[in-house]
Image: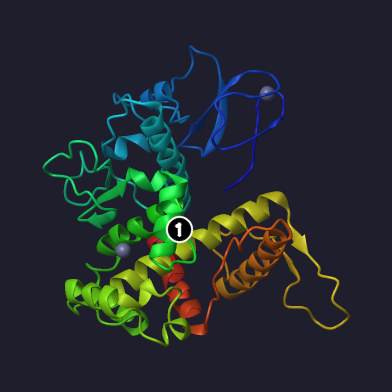
């Protein structure tokens, strides 16, 4: 994520801010310019979901929809009869807006399913304890452009319990969204293109393998013992589609983290003696622009090493508890090349 500044007074602002803490001006995010804009009541308007405290994006002036680019993607939202479910929805929206920001910066199509039923994207945020609509799923997942998030995942206690039960190293709302949207973009960017599908299979394996059977096997017998040499996570070893979605989510993790490091002007020169140091780096590239991928990845790895070290100093677990083996690096590079191609087309 980049850094934002108040257009009136220069104060540094967060992506989620609705007003400047210093000068008091209202601010809102404008998707067409990817900037926070300060405004007065008359010249712009907020998305309708601003009224619930879950969105600070502005509505484009040439649209009749009361919703912003990110909220137009919502299909079902929870029935928030209490503060707790409203809070859960807000957490999910914060993560979703960050996701949509990344998709826009990558130049990916962000079409909503209500106007593009066949190739659009939509979100269902479902509370299985409430009445669930007949056409909705109850479990977090992706199906034909519909991403479902079970809103229990917004509760940090529930999420941590799930993480431990599933033996995962990392579990966040943003991680869920990045993973699930990976399935959507596979359908959109890989499946219809024979050349891309062919090279996909070289890196990720043949996805025609029975999906339900593969997951059944994974949940009953656990991951293959050598998964850490070939995959980013144990779950990625369950099926090529899951490998793609897991690796895709890591691509977004690393790009977003490196954009933040770039915006902050981070540089690392560890005091470790005279020899060439692989942990030295200068975050001098905007990772959303056309970049030399290997150079980017080396910088990203150095950044995660530094962040993990600082987290440990604070008594927290690693912010990025993963090792990028050579096979995973190649898969990330494949995803990068596909995204470059899409951007150029
Ligand atoms: Zn200000
Ligand atoms: Zn909105
Ligand atoms: Zn998945």
Is 111 left or right of 315, judged from the image as shown? left
**Which residue is drawn at the image coordinates 70% and 50% (left, top)?**
264
The local crowd at label 1, few if under 14, some if 14 to 19, many if 20 or more residues have their Cα within 10 Å, is some
Q: Quick one: 345 or 146, which is closer to the camera?
A: 146
Is 98 left or right of 301, judged from the image as shown? left
Q: Residue furthest right?
A: 274
Q: Quick one: 43 or 280, which is closer to the camera?
A: 280
Q: Note whether 317 is above or below 55 in the view shown.
A: below
Question: Picture quarter containing residue 22?
Answer: top right
Question: Picture quarter containing residue 124?
Answer: top left
Question: Picture quarter containing residue 6?
Answer: top right
Is residue 208 in view? Answer: yes
**Which residue is drawn at the image coordinates 51% and 37% (left, top)?**
33
**Helix or strand or loop: what does disc 1 sit on?**
loop
Q: Quick one: 189 or 1, which is closer to the camera?
A: 1
Is 94 left or right of 318, judged from the image as shown? left
Q: Residue furthest left?
A: 134
Q: Position of residue 149 (x, y in %)?
A: 31, 48
Is residue 196 in view? Answer: no
Is 81 left or right of 37, judged from the image as shown? left
Q: Position of residue 342 (x, y in %)?
A: 38, 61
Q: Residue furthest bottom?
A: 226
Q: Position of residue 312 (x, y in %)?
A: 69, 62
Q: Quick one: 145 or 321, which is closer to the camera?
A: 321
Q: Which residue is mark 1?
A: 171
Q: Position of residue 85 (x, y in %)?
A: 36, 33
Q: Note whether 56 is above or below 249 in the view shown.
A: above
Q: Specify the quadrant that holds the C terminus.
A: bottom left
Q: Note whether 57 is above or below 243 in the view shown.
A: above
């Amino acid at each position: 994520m980049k850094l934002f500044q108040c257009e009136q007074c220069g104060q540094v602002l967060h992506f989620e801010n609705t007003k400047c803490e210093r000068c008091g001006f209202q601010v809102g995010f404008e998707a067409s310019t990817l900037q926070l804009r300060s405004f007065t009541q008359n010249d712009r308007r907020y998305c309708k979901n601003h009224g619930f405290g879950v969105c600070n994006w502005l509505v484009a002036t040439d649209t009749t929809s009361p919703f912003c680019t990110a909220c137009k993607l919502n299909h079902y939202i929870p029935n928030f009869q209490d503060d707790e479910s409203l809070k859960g929805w807000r957490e999910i929206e914060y993560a979703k807006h960050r996701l949509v920001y990344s998709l826009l910066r990558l130049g990916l199509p962000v079409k909503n399913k209500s106007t593009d039923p066949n190739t659009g994207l939509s979100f269902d945020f479902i509370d299985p304890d409430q009445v669930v609509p007949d056409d909705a799923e109850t479990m977090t997942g992706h199906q034909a452009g519909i991403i479902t998030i079970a809103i229990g995942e917004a509760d940090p206690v529930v999420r941590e319990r799930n993480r431990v039960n599933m033996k995962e190293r990392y579990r966040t709302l943003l991680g869920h969204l990045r993973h699930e949207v990976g399935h959507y973009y596979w359908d959109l960017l890989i499946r219809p293109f024979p050349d891309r599908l062919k090279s996909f299979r070289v890196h990720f394996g043949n996805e025609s393998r029975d999906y339900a059977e593969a997951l059944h096997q994974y949940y009953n017998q656990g991951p293959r013992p050598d998964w850490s040499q070939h995959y980013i996570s144990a779950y990625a070893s369950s099926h090529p589609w899951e490998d793609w979605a897991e690796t895709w989510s890591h691509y977004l993790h690393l790009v977003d983290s490196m954009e933040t490091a770039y915006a902050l002007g981070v540089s690392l020169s560890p005091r470790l003696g005279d020899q060439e140091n692989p942990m030295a780096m200068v975050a001098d590239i905007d990772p959303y622009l056309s970049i030399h991928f290997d150079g980017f990845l080396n910088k990203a790895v150095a950044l995660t090493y530094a962040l993990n070290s600082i987290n440990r100093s604070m008594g927290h677990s690693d912010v990025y508890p993963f090792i990028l083996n050579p096979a995973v690096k190649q898969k990330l590079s494949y995803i990068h090349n596909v995204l470059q191609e899409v951007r150029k087309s």
